[in-house]
Structures are given as structure tokens and as C-alpha cells.
Amino acid sequence: MSKKPAILGGDGIRQNPLALRVTMRDEESVAAQRVLDADVLSAFIAAEGKFFKGGEMIQKFEDTWAKQYGFDHAISVNSWTSGLVTAIGAVGVEPGDEVICSPYTMSASATCALFYGGIPVFADIDPDTFCLSAESIEHCITERTKAIVVVHLFGHPADMDAIMELARRHDIRVIEDAAQAPGVEYKGQPVGAIGDIGGFSLNFHKHIHTGEGGMLVTNDADLARRCQLIRNHGENAVDHSDESLVNAIGGNYRLTELQAAIGIEQLSRLDGYLAHRRTLAAHLRGRLESVRGLRVQADPVNGTTHAYYVLPIHYNAAEVGLSRNLFVKSVLAELPTPDGPEGTALVEAYVRPLYLSRIYQEQIAIGEKGFPFTCNEGVRYDYSKGICPVAERMYEQELILCPIIREPLDIQVMDDLADAIEKVVENAALISDTLGTMDSSEIFTPVNAANSTNVR
């Protein structure tokens, strides 16, 4: 390709806007109307009895999810953030307990520990999967470590064999944050309950959704019961029983009948969505495999699958000859102006490593006296820049995300994106000579899609 780059005034590769994602169909409307006609939008009661676990739609949604993917128990919640907090409580985290977390994920995957006085300790990520590195986890384990929150980031499973071996050896609980990985398998096992407990997000931006919501899964009946207690004002249900009171104080983390009815219809299409995304990812990977300076994340093998919430790409600025920022802006200039974050073809990096945020830098979370960071006398937690070099490198230099690996987009869109990338790489010297010394804000400002991929 020798055409003038669009960022320098040439014609773009594609003019037609990308089709928007349409998530609601007639089936959802019919299901919602049935609930409205029944005039029961929630049937939960915060006391033991028939409705402690919710109404007809809630129980059907949970049963359907559990059976579809082979879990013993599924427990719906009103957000995956609530689900993470519930899981932390269910596994028994107490003030001063340490919880090993990923630094490269949504904030709630770490702050969930704080709700019970747990202290997040950040291990580094694997440079290929972007999930927690088992080797880094091992260096973070102390006698105070209670749990590990494993995030299956972007839809790719973490190395669960190695992580579970560590957890069993040190008697540590494992919580799987599979917000971006519904329906994914690790070596033939569904993610979510390979550890003690885990779950999925049903936020609007996920593969399937109920607007807001989440689904906890576990194969442990006691943990399932603890989750149901925390979800539904558990202090009322244990008042006349001999159950443990530890972390039994609950809240209202309940999903509604209306959301559950919609979720049942959404769940029926999940496998089809996953298959479509895998097809798009495979095609784009094939198109980009010989492009210098780019390396698309490999598709998992050996019975392991990928949900392709987004497609991660490693970028080498030295090989391409453009800064990452200018490369992304140049590619986006070849494509139609995005109509919102889901129309943005490429995004720089992901989130800033979590430990660099003020809550960890100043170690102030609950109250003004430093709780829970001050729970362990004589222990000062290190959240300084440099503790997770791989995560920092991905954030600052190397990672690019492709959020348009989604329905209803097709192979032609992947080809247009690949053509745009190839055009920019082939004209990298010209673009750099012309624009390389300019402030990037003077060139082109794309929609930043990071926030849309960062919701629990």
C-alpha cells in the first residue's frame, strides 16, 4: 500500500460507520413483559423461608447458569462488584488478612478486600496472558495471606494449575474474577469454580448483560450458603441458627426478577457470541501475524478457550518506527469516527496499575487512621512505582487493545482494520517525519474506550 495516510490528509481505508452492538431482542421484551404482568419485580425476603433465595426468575436464572456450565451452585447479585465483596466475605477474610491481587484490572478486583479489612498485596502479571503470574504470587505470600483474587483478564484464563498448586500448598483461598470470561474453559474445566469461588459480570459492556448484575459460582455448598447470607441481610437468617456469625452481616446485593428474566434470554446466546468473537480474533490474528512490531495474543490450546472480551496486541514502537500513541491515532484516522467507545478500533494500554492510585499511595481507605493498612503492627505495605514492572511496561509502552472483536461486526471489518494497520506501518517513516515531533493532542483525539472495558 502506498496511498497517503489519512492522518496526513489522504483518504481513509473505511468510510462506513461500524455497526452498533444491539443487545436486546424480542425474546427479552417478551420475558420482561411476563414479569411485569405477574406484578412481582422482586420476591426476596431477608429471613429464612421460601423466598430467602429469591423468586421464580432468580432461581431459574441461577439454575440455568449452573447447569449450562457445570457448576454446583450459582448465586446472582446486583453487580459483580457486589459479587467480589460477597466472595471475600464468604471465604472468611478478616481485618489484617492479606489478599493477593492483580495490579492490572478494574479497581474493585482489589478494593473488594478492603470491605472486610483485608489488605491488597499486588503481584505482577504474565506478559503473555496479562493475568497474575504464579511466580510473582509466590513472592508475595506471607503467613498473613488469606486469599488470591485471580482475574481472567480480557477473557484469557490465568495459569490455574500453577496458582492452585500454590494455594493448596499454603492453604490459601482462591477467588476467580471471570468478569470478562463467561463460558471460558481452562483445560476443559469451566473457569469460575476451579478455585474456591468466582463469578462473572452482567454489566452492560459485557458479553451478555442485565444492565447491571453479576453471577457467583462455586462447587462448595458452604460457600454458596455464605454468599446467599451476605447477599440478603444474613444477620436476620442466622439469628435463630447455630451458623457462624463471621462475616454474616449482609446487605442488599439482590438481582431483580426483571433482570433475571432478561438474563435467562441473554444466557441462551452466550455460546454463539463466543464462537463469533473467536472467529473474528482468529481472522485478525492471521492478517497481522507478519506485520512488523505487532504481536497478537495467541489463541489458547489444550482445552483452554478465550472469550475475547477485547483482543490484546503487543506493540514494539522501535520496530514500527512510531510511538504507540501516534500509531493508534494514525490507525484510527483511517477508520470512521467512532460513535462511542464500542466503535473505537484500538485503545492504548488499559488501566494504570492500581497501586499507583491515591488509596494505596496514601494508605487511607476506611476512616482517617489508615485502616486496614495499619492492622498488622510493624508492617508497612509497599505500593511504590516499580513493584510490578510487567504491568507498568504494558501500561506505559507495550499494550494495545482491540475492542471491536464483537458482534455484529464481521470479517470485512477485521480486514479493514488490518488494512489500516498495514497502511500505517508501511508509511511509518513518513508519518514520523511529518508528525513525530508534534504534541499528539494537536493531531487527532480518539474516543478513549478504556472505561468501557473497566466496569464490574
Image (cartoon, rainbow, N blue to C red):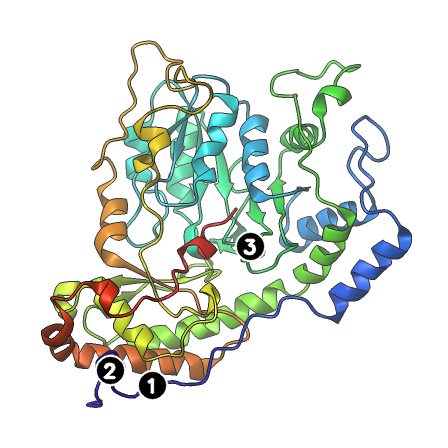
Q: Earlier in the sequence, mark 2 or mark 3?
A: 3
The residue depicted at 29 percent of the width and 40 percent of the height is 124
| Residue annotated with mark 2 | 423
Marker disc for residue 13: 1
Amino acid type assigned to the residue bearing label 2 in the image: Lys
For marks 3 and 1, give the one nearer the viewer: 1
Task: Provide residue 359's location: percent of width, then percent of height.
Answer: 37, 30
CA gap, disc 2 and disc 1? 9 Å
Task: Provide residue 180's location: percent of width, then percent of height.
Answer: 49, 53
Amino acid type assigned to the residue bearing label 3 in the image: Pro
Please, what secondary structure does the residue beneath circle 1 have? loop
Q: Above or below — where is 133 with respect to 209?
A: above
| Residue annotated with mark 3 | 182
CA gap, disc 3 and disc 1? 34 Å
- Label 2, residues with CA under 10 Å away: few <14, some 14-19, many ≥20: many
Q: Above or below — where is 254 with respect to 432?
A: above
The residue depicted at 22 percent of the width and 42 percent of the height is 389
